[in-house]
Image (cartoon, rainbow, N blue to C red):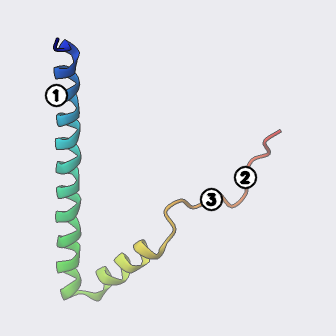
Amino acid sequence: MINVSSTEITKALVMRYLQHDADYKKRSLYLQEIISMGRKDQLWIRALAAYFDSPMDVPPIKSLCKN
């Protein structure tokens, strides 16, 4: 017996994968473009280095009281 919803789930998973893959390719193209601009101007390379050296999740300076 074949579950009817399995094809819908499969389609949803394929669409999610394709969207993720397209987003990844777009980000890769942006990064390649910034790197190529960095060959002409070192400002872009320094900006990339600062971006990748910074922590991903910056905690707030002063957290709110949890009471």
Which corner quadrant of the image does residue 3 belong to?
Answer: top left
Q: Nearer the viewer, residue 43 or 1?
A: 1
Q: How far across and how far down the image is residue 49, in percent?
A: 39, 80
The residue to which callout 3 is attached is 59
The structure residue drawn at horizontal position 17% and vertical position 71%, both measured from the top left corner, is: 33
Seen in the picture, residue 59 relative to 9 is either above or below; the reply is below
What element does badge 2 sit on? Answer: loop
What element does badge 3 sit on? Answer: loop
Amino acid on which disc 2 is placed: Ser
Say how many tags the image has.
3
Amino acid on which disc 3 is placed: Pro
Which corner quadrant of the image does residue 62 belong to?
Answer: bottom right
The residues tagged by marks 3 and 2 sit, at their Cα atoms, a distance apart of: 8 Å
Neighbours of disc 1 within 10 Å: few (<14), some (14-19), many (20+): few
Dots 3, 2 in contact, CB < 8 A? yes
Amino acid on which disc 1 is placed: Lys
The residue to which callout 2 is attached is 63
What element does badge 1 sit on? Answer: helix
The residue to which callout 1 is attached is 11
Q: How far across and how far down the image is residue 44, in percent?
A: 29, 80
Q: Earlier in the sequence, mark 1 or mark 3?
A: 1
Q: Nearer the viewer, residue 9 or 25?
A: 9
Q: Nearer the viewer, residue 21 or 30?
A: 21
